[in-house]
Amino acid sequence: MHYTYRFRLKPTPEQRELLDYHRDTCRQLYNHALRVFEKIPESAGTLNQRVRQVRDQLTDLKEWWDELNDLYSTVAQAAVMRIEDSIKALSELKQNGYNVGSLNWKAPDEFRSFTYVQSGFEFDSKNGQSVLSLSKLADIPIQKHREIPGDVTLKEVTLKKEPTGEWFASFVVSGKETPEKPVKPERCVGIDVGILKYAHDTDGTAVGSLDLSNERERLERAQRDLSRKEHGSNNWEQQRKVVAQRHSNLKRKRRDFLHKLSNYYATQYDLVAVEDLDAKGLIELPSNSRNRASASWGTFKRMLEYKCDREGTHFVTVEPNDTTKECASCGVKTEKPLWVREHSCPTCGFVADRDANAAWNILSRGFEELGVGHSESTPVETALPVDTPVSAKCVVETGSPTLKERTASAVSE
């Protein structure tokens, strides 16, 4: 499997200019390659073959385009091969129901990254400072907040400039061995996601949603200030960076929460079952779309899936229809509006939190999907009360000891 490690770069002002120069040269090369590619008929071969025809012209281009000689060879090749990746991405979006157009040339502020493939980069240390040595570029200080395992192979590194002006390096690694998934999973959990409580699982743990109201308010104020500036002026550019920073802060806090929560479930269980929600369709519904978009259920599911694969945990998505209506004990459906937060079955008398009942149904469907046996205990015997749900602020670090303690205390009760 391939994994990505992302680190912040700390370039000097001179190195920032050099990074921008390489980025803009790659942008111009991409635009030129796209124009050449569009002139090649589809009958000339497959998508990959046509893109490679363009790439093979790089040697001739360097004879009259002096700036290309400043780029490392794989950087220039990656800029051209980006056309193939972009077309494939558009095709995938189209298959998923999105309206997409065609590739267009990139303006200076639209092309933000360039990539070293296989070679031309390495970690080094100079004067006690970790640096990223890049061929034909510079030795750039890097904030290496965690170590990359020594048993993996560095495949490529992508240097990206964020709208805030910050630079990051993303390393793609391969070769890490993944543990085998257990034939008979013992620690199993079903997770129901929502808005008031972000996640409610079958172990009785409820995690509150992340409160980003302050971040949104600061972003909206910054956007209003930007709208009052003359577009393109120095004041406008300064305020644009403030808006970009507000967006970045909100995004980082949300993704940090999702990373840590998904890591907890992937590392603590042998089987994780979640609903196969249509995140795009839910956002398009007429009411409460902002909160649904902010919840990022699709992102959480993707994070959970690849982390379960990494940890050797079974990951199962189930049909979401009627998980709230069905009784987890007897299976009888009971209509309940959204404001009813308790499940009370008129047939068998099973009473539980609405989300806890849904989580049990999700786990039961996960067992059926995976083809493993059900737990000997019934939801009536094992359903756990949640008097004090875990706050999103308590998800403070990877591994989430707060969640572990909450689960342990619920079981002891």
Image: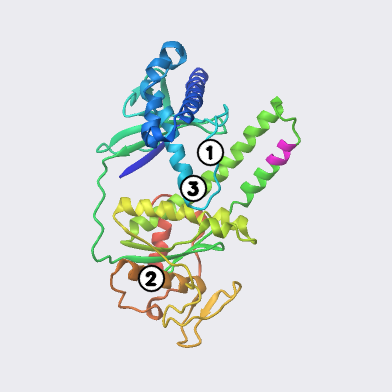
Q: Nearer the viewer, mark 2 or mark 1?
A: 1
Give the x, y percent position of residue 15.
48, 20
- Position of the C terminus, as image quadrant, is bottom left
Q: Are marks 2 and 1 in contact (CB under 8 Å)?
A: no
Can you say whether 82 is above or below 366 in the image?
Answer: above
Q: Nearer the viewer, mark 3 or mark 1?
A: 1
Mark 2 sits on what residue?
Answer: 365
Residues packed near mark 1 inside 10 Å, few (<14), some (14 to 19) or many (20 plus): few
Secondary element type, mark 1: loop
The part of the chain drawn in magenta is: 222-227
226 drawn magenta = yes
Amino acid on which the number 1 mark rests in the picture: Ser
User: Coloured how?
Assistant: rainbow
3D distance between C-alphas at marks 2 and 1: 41 Å
Q: Which badge, 2 or 1, comes first in the chain's sequence?
A: 1
Amino acid on which the number 2 mark rests in the picture: Arg
Mark 3 sits on what residue?
Answer: 93
Is residue 11 rendered to the left or right of residue 187? right
Q: For the point 45% across and 87% down, which residue is it?
A: 348
